[in-house]
Amino acid sequence: MSAWTGAVAEALVGEGHDVRVFARRRPELDTVPGTRTVGVRGPSFGAHGGTWLGWGAMAALARADRVVATTWPVATLAARMGLPLAVVAHGSDLAPRLVSTGACRRTFSLASRRFAVSRWLADRVPGGAWVLPAPVDAAPRPARLGSHTWAFVGRAIRGKGGDRFVRWVARAGVRGLMVGDGPELEAWRRLARVLGARIRFAGALRREEVRALIPVVDLVCLPARQGPDGMAEGLGLVLIEAAAVGVPTVGTAVGGVPEALGPEGLVVPDPDDAAAAVDAIRGWWSVERGERAWAWCREVHGGRRTARAVLA
C-alpha cells in the first residue's frame, strides 16, 4: 500500500467514515489505524492486480456508498458496477502504454470524479482531473534542526535517483540515511562503500517509523529522474511530509517533484554534478527554509482537506 493511500484512508476515518482498505498482500503491509485493512493476492499481480483486488473486495463493494480507487486499474470492476467512484491518478498508472488503452479511458470516463496527486499527472488524465491537496498534516511546530544528516526515503529503483543521493552525501561529507528497499539497493550500497559515503541503510520501514525519522534529519532529498517511457515521479509525498515538520527539501525538475517541493524547496538544476549540487544546497539551506516550508504545508495541505475534496 502506498503512503498516500494509507494517509487518505486515515483522513477519511478522521472524518467519521467507515473505511475498508484493499491492497496487495505483502509481509510489510501496513494496517491503517481505524480501518479494516485486507491483503489480497493472486497470480501475476503486477499485470492483473486490478482484477484480484476487485474480486477480493466484491462483498465490500456491494455494500459501499462510495469507492476511492488510488490507481485506475483497480477501479475497472467498480466502474462496471455503477458505484459512485472517485479515481485518483497516482503515478506509474499513467504510463503512456497504459493511458492509450481502452480500459484506462473507459474507467476514467465512468468515474464520478477524477483526481490526481499533482498537476503534472492531472494533465495526463484522459478528460483531465482535479488536483488534490496532500493528505499530510503539519506538526504543531517545526522540528529542531542540526543533526547534519541528509535523508532519502523511497523505493530503491533507478527513477528515484538514490545513486545521485549517495554521491551528494559523499561529496558533502555529511551523514546519510536511506529508507526503502528494491532492486537497486545493493548497487547503491556498493557505490556508498566505493565513495566512502557515511550512509545508514535502514531498509523498508512502516509509515509510523518513517514519520519518526524525518524530524531528526536536516534535509530530505528526492533526486528523481525521468524514465525512458516519459514517466516520472508523480509527486514525492515524502517531500511534503518533511515540510510538515519543518525539514527543508531538495529535488529535481522531474514529474510532480517541483510541486511537492513547494515554494521553499530547492530544485537542483544539474543533479548528476555532485559538486555543483552540494554547493547549491549549502548556499540555499537554512533553518528558516524549513520553517517557511512548514507554514506552506499547514496552509495548503492536510488530511481533512484531502478527504473533503475526495468526497465532495
Image (cartoon, rainbow, N blue to C red):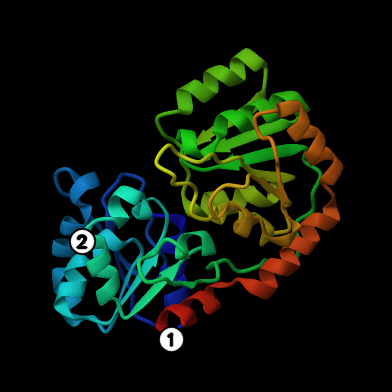
Q: Is residue 183 above or below residue 118?
A: above
- For marks 1 and 2, the one nearer the N-term is 2
Quadrant of residue 107 in the image?
A: bottom left
Q: Is residue 211 left or right of residue 80?
A: right
Q: Nearer the viewer, residue 120 or 17?
A: 120
Instruction: Say which element carries label 1.
Output: loop
Most foreground residue, 8 or 311: 311
Please tell me whether residue 166 is drawn above or below residue 69 in the rendered image.
Answer: above
* Residue at numbered disc 1: 312
Q: Is residue 62 left or right of residue 197?
A: left
Can residue 138 be seen in this snapshot? yes
**Where is residue 274 shown, x and y percent of the image?**
71, 28
- Name which residue lies at 46% across and 56% down: 3
Reading the image, the residue beneath label 2 is 102
Q: Secondary structure at mark 2?
A: helix
Residue 50 relative to residue 134: left or right: left
Res. 256 image quadrant: bottom right
Within 10 angstroms of label 1, few (less than 14), some, or many (20 or more) residues? Answer: few
Q: Position of residue 147 (x, y in %)?
A: 77, 41
> Quarter holding the C terminus?
bottom left
Relative image position of residue 94 (x, y in whole percent): 37, 55
Please report the residue visible at 21 percent of the width from the left and 46 percent of the height from the top: 47
Q: Up-down: is 108 above or below 238? A: below
Under mark 1, the amino acid is: Ala
Alpha-carbon neighbours of circle 2 within 10 Å: few (<14), some, or many (≥20)? few
* Nearer the camera: disc 1 or disc 2: 2
- Mark 2 is on which residue type? Gly
The residue lying at 60 percent from left, 69 percent from top is: 137
Could you tell me residue 71's position as x and y percent? 33, 61
Among all residues in the image, which is located at the extreme top? 194
- The structure residue drawn at horizontal position 70% and vertical position 24%, both measured from the top left corner, is 170
